[in-house]
Amino acid sequence: MSATEVIATQPRFRQTTSELTWFDRWDHILARLGFKRNGHRVETGLYALGNPTADSPVFVTANYTLSFDALRSSLAGVDGYILVLDTRGINVWCAAGEGTFCTYELVERINEAKLHDVVNHRVVIVPQLGAPSVSAYEVERRSGFKVEFGPVRAQDLPEYLKTHQATPEMRRVRFDLGDRLVLIPIELVHTLLPMLLAAVVLFFLSGLRYALAAVAAVLAGVVLFPILLPFLPTRAFSTKGFILGGIVALPFVVASWSQSDAAWWLRALEALSYLLPMSAVTAFLALNFTGSTPFTSKTGVKREILAYIPVMAGMFGGGVVLILALAVIRFLRG
């Protein structure tokens, strides 16, 4: 075998550290804001963390920068290897749901990295949230490496490594207020422009109150909903959204009813012109959070969409018709 052939068959890996730079943190901010959503990736393959030896543990993660950085920053003082799978820049949990963080990809990366030449043991530590698409039996059969499902959160890994046994608390998926708050910026950025356009159109068409109603309905869906999620009644996100939208619409309904001297039926139509579209908009935006919480399943979300999207469309369309009709009536009355 020539020297060139020897070099070509040697395992190759990149070096990384547990320290996050300002550039890393800036990337996290941009990712949270949804800026260049598909651009927050790291190269796939094997990384050396610290000064690992052939007996050091191997951790598996996604090639989404937030996932990779969460893992390595939690392993300060730990020498090991990080095997990065190609999840197309999506986090472990969502990628497992989509099928990109999966058995096939894990086996491919193990073989590509020649992991059997890097470490003496035959164990890879996979995040628990990646379990839905990873068959431990198939991985071991096809690669020779046993899959050990680690804790839900990377920050628990140092404690987990002491015994390689996860406590019930490490296995529990939490979705606390902090977890919900980090979802708000990207949703707010995505809805900001449509919200402002709708508010401007409604301001010139029907006045300031309708413009404020549009802003209130959107902010209820993207800001209040994740904050109040565990406290809103019902299980379906859509009905939770309908309830929240109705509550937010209530002050506009009361104001339209009490501050007008028009006939009762006209006031009732005006009240509905707030209640119907505001509830529908808030409920629709609430559905965006079904993919980022532990409260839903893929089949459940599909059933919910089929059941409630037609209702939302009908309520929103009816509200738009009422707003236009009332604008025409006001115009004719001078």
Image (cartoon, grey):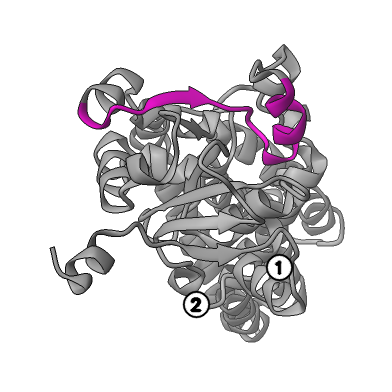
Q: Quadrant of the C terminus?
A: bottom right
Find residue 80 and report its horizontal and vertical position in percent: 60, 46
Foreground: 307 or 169?
169
Which quadrant of the figure has residue 195?
Answer: bottom right
**Does the magenta segment cover residue 74?**
no
Residue 64 to residue 331: above or below: above
Residue at the limit of the structure toward the left, as seen here: 1
Which quadrant of the figure has residue 237?
Answer: top right
**Does the magenta segment cover residue 144?**
yes
Q: Quadrant of the N terminus?
A: bottom left
Find residue 239 and report its horizontal and vertical position in percent: 58, 32
Foreground: 257 or 277?
277
Q: Residue at x 57, y 39 (%)?
A: 56
Which residues make up the magenta segment?
142-162
Find residue 108 and report its horizontal and vertical position in percent: 25, 46
Foreground: 71 or 215?
71
Q: Is residue 42 left or right of residue 334?
A: left
Task: Name the residue tied to disc 2.
Answer: 36
Crowding at label 2, few (<14), some or many (≥20) Cα neighbours within 10 Å? few
**Residue type for callout 1:** Val
Task: Name the residue tied to disc 1.
Answer: 215
Q: Secondary structure at mark 2?
A: loop
Crowding at label 1, few (<14), some or many (≥20) Cα neighbours within 10 Å? some
Label at residue 272: none
